[in-house]
Image: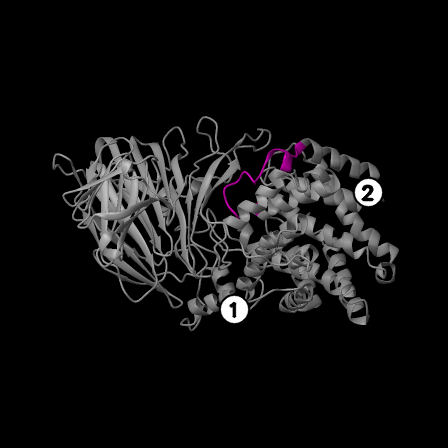
Amino acid sequence: MLEKDYKRKDIVVIAERVYLEAGGRESIILRIKKAQEVSRRWSYAELTGWRLHKYESYDQRDTDATTALVVLHLENPNDTGLSYAADYKEIMLSLAEAKYFIDVVWCDRAFDQVGVTILAHSWMYMKKSPFFNEIFSAKEARKIIGWFHDYAKLLLRDKDSPTYLTFRPYDNQEIGVGCLTILAQVLMQDYPQLAKGLMEVADSRVYGWALRNRNPDDTLFYEPIWIKSVYFYALYRKPEWLGNENCRQSFEDFLHQMPGNGLNTVYNWMFSHSYPDIMALGARIFKDGRYKWMANRLLQERIEERPRRSRHVFSELASLEYCEDYPLKYEAQSIDKYDHIWEGWASNVFHLWLFWDDDVLPVKPVEGSMILEKTSGGHYPDKPSKPIPDKIVFRDGWEKDSLFAILNLRGYVSKGGVFKAHRYAGSNEVITIVYDEPFVIEAQDFWHRDCELERWRLNAFCIREDGKWLHEPCGETPQDAELVFFKNLHSLDVSKTVLSEYYGWINERICILAKNRFFAVLDICNSNSFGEAGVRWHLKGEYDFKRDKTVLRLFGKRMVVYYPHAGEYKVEAEENTETIPVYQHKPSISLSLVSKSDRMGFTTLFIPGGDEELEAESIKVKDLNGRLAFPMALGVLLRQSGEIIGARSFQLPAVFDYGMIKTDAEAFVLKPLEGRLHFDFVNSHVTCLECLDRPSRVELDGRVLSENYWEYSYNRLSLNLPVSSGSLSIVLRSGE
């Protein structure tokens, strides 16, 4: 059950709040004039483009506040609404007078196209008002149209120019497609030839939902920008795209990358944005209540939970007067405000209102763990190729405190090792682990993402030389992680993925979600030469670091991280003392599990909640000749529950002895219950269990297994199973 089910009337209230928090008309116009003034004073070489555009002038928040006025006008067909429309007119005239997005210097004009698109889109809807001609004189309307006209001419002029400081359409997120389409609609009546030229360029540069199911850049920050750009194009040029399979998958993937608490997943980008308008758009197109449910969750988290997180960070800081980090300083001063510092373009209240459909009722999703596939490549002019596995989502529910994790499979999209746009070397990385709060994150800052994001900032296997982690993400041939298997079993979701060439190393990563219990990651690593390497984990929260475990606490939630190692590797901890907003990607502590060898094995368990701690210890796994199998086979015993977690390398298909169980399974969990044993396994043909009592029956995937497949003698149950993967329930006589 949702705590909140927002309606369009609630979004109108939010729109007014956004506008008031921006300071109203005079405050916004003052910032427009300041932007024009600063633009004339400073050359590009003398300024940091981010600071000028984001914080010292009219910025994304002001764009959001400006377009919110259209909502307030159209929802109030009275004197109040006319007052809001008058404010909108004065702000738009000020933007036109300043030639904003034309004269203002910024480091990447491509993103100006997002702002132009939103303002032009809001202008289209303002013109639908029955009072439009009472609000705008013909001269004022021509002035605003002229501003859009001048920008459109620059788009056509630079259509084949290099990116960044030109006005060319930006192909990465198909931003130009959306901008060209909306400007063509705005200019069609007054400048039909220019509008035709804009659409011809859009037609020549678009891939959209014809060939893609997602934005080619590997970060969710750009996904809403791409979805909206393609949506605007489809709406006016290719309505048959609306509802096709690629369109559906773009919203499906976005939904399934969100945890149940509505805290937006972040990777390859530092700041946690929120995109309820994207889920609202999906709900409108497909009449899908699951998207509406997530739109509500995202909106609730954004309005009600985010200020609490900010207060948690800044409550102990008496003053940020001498803080060098301007965004951080601004954020500290903006606690309890609706709009986040970096939002306003990718997500804005005008589109939230426009897309919201009260007739679509929220329906809680039921899907669990799954593979997400994505069309690969496709940066203009390279055509996208067929969908391939991109990420694995692990989920044991959609509640706020359901355990949630994402494993990344992809490396670069490249040809011959040449970097292409906003992908990063996240092969075989656990992006995040969430238990109502994000306890595992990437260790990013603003300047380290994409090709600049060092691998040691990820939750991944890394190489160290002379005591320093390698910056280089992959070898000369960038690699994706190979998906060996992914299985949904009775009480487990299990994957094995392999990074097969990382500077001479192979990293097998086995991930196990034991539903409502734990998330385990077992890494088996080997090389053709002796070296130093390890697994990095970046953790958030108040922490108690110990030799075998770290206890994390955040907003009343608790997670215990175990790394039982029995001397095979050492554990190092690095504390981060910076001020770190909870939803930003800077960890409280980073753990390194480090070894020197040509063969290594690492086990990490994440156990959420509860007062009782399950002590974890490493099992000395042996082969059938009694020789230690580490690290080609790994085992962990949870002492209180008696559970055994095990995995072996795909390179060594043999039976190993884990104590009370001998099996050739590639991954398994054996869980003793009252009167029975539960055994989930992947790729097993031979298994023997120690049982003091003869089983009364053996069930495989819920069906009774014939005794032709099992034999009991001398306190040992031998299994010769008809399937290689499944779930066994062994009912013992003493338990009847």
Image quadrant where one finds the C terminus: bottom left
Residue indicated by mark 1? 335
Judge the density around disc 2: few (<14), some (14-19), many (≥20) Cα neighbours within 10 Å: some
* First of labels 1, 2 by sequence position: 2
Identify whether 694 is placed above or below 317. above
Task: Name the dominant secondary structure of the magenta segment.
Answer: loop
Q: How many discs mark residues in the rendered view?
A: 2
Query: In which quadrant of the rendered view does residue 656 lie?
Result: top left
Q: Is the C-beta separation of discs 1 and 2 under 8 Å?
A: no
Quadrant of residue 171 in the image? top right
* Position of residue 224 in the picture relative to residue 689 (left or right): right
How far across and how far down the image is residue 404, in percent? Answer: 42, 53
Can see residue 334?
no
Three-letter code, disc 2: Met
Q: What is the span of residues highlighted in magenta in the rendered image? A: 205-223
Residue 188 image label: 2
Amino acid at circle 1: Ile
Magenta stretch: includes residue 731 = no
